[in-house]
Amino acid sequence: MTPTILITRPDPAGALFADAIRQRVGCGVAIEISPLLKIVFAGELPDLDGITRLIFTSRNGVEAFARASDRRDITCYCVGDATAQVARDHGLTAISSSGAADDLVVRVQSDAVTGPCLHIRGDRSVGDIARRLGASGIPTSEAVLYRQVPNPLSDQAQRLLRGDGPVILPLFSPRTAQLFFANGKGRPKMTVVALSAAVAAMVPDGFDGELIVAERPDAAAMLDVIQRLVDQGKSLETGKRAQ
């Protein structure tokens, strides 16, 4: 039986990822979108005088900055290619570290950035980037410009999870993984595709399904896993019909 893909990313990232899945595996795949977080833009941008580099660890940080400032003359470092593309779409010069928070820290350090830098982030953040860069001699401050507000699963998503059909659950952050598993341990016939080891660590002991960690912490690697799982489901379905 071909699995249903349950997407819990906040919008617009969730809808964009659903479109990417359809482009990769075809429009026939069943997708349910039910964001577990709602992004609320809030907070004040500090004075940017003297800031030589911006740091973004999510597309939401880019969107928050673009809402708060017309400045587009400060080069930015981005955690991954997708975030960097969003920054470029807003007119910023963006450098991608093509990885996770650790890769971003290493890239800024290896480029001999002198700072001061400003990390635009949400109320929850991983990687302790500002402190680590500061400790290495690169002055870095933070600005919290958005909040991640928990959002319950939709009725449709809950019905999907009460069923017995196979489900693919892509998880992109430790926070969404934590929220999803807050009320249970999942169920058999569920495959969790985790963006990274940090996300996978939030899957509880005793999880009855399958856990796969993407080879790289980016959407493209997540799509690779999802395509393989969907293809496997189609093959099994075809084989049963052939019998």
Image: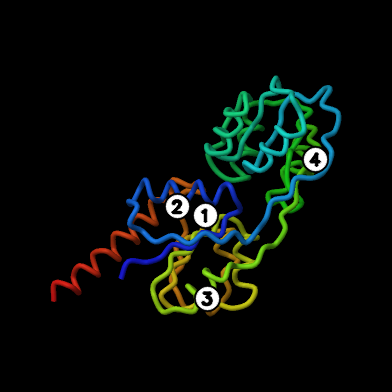
Which residue is located at x 53 percent, y 80 percent?
Answer: 206
Circles 2 and 1, Cβ within 8 Å, touching? The answer is yes
Instruction: Give the CA separation, mark 2 to mark 4.
Output: 29 Å
Which residue is at the front of the view, 99 or 166? 166
The numbered disc on residue 186 is 3
- The residue singled out by tag 2 in the image is 222
User: Label 1: how many residues lie within 10 Å, few (<14), some (14-19) or many (20+)?
Assistant: many
Which residue is located at x 58 percent, y 38 percent?
Answer: 83
Mark earlier in primary sequence (3, 4): 4
Instruction: Give the CA separation, mark 3 to mark 4.
Output: 35 Å
Circles 3 and 4, Cβ within 8 Å, touching? The answer is no
User: Label 4: how many residues lie within 10 Å, few (<14), some (14-19) or many (20+)?
Assistant: some
Mark earlier in primary sequence (1, 3): 3
Question: What amino acid is found at the position of numbered circle 2 in the picture?
Answer: Met
Left or right: residue 171 versus residue 28 is right
Question: What amino acid is found at the position of numbered circle 1 in the picture?
Answer: Leu
Q: Is residue 193 above or below residue 47?
A: below
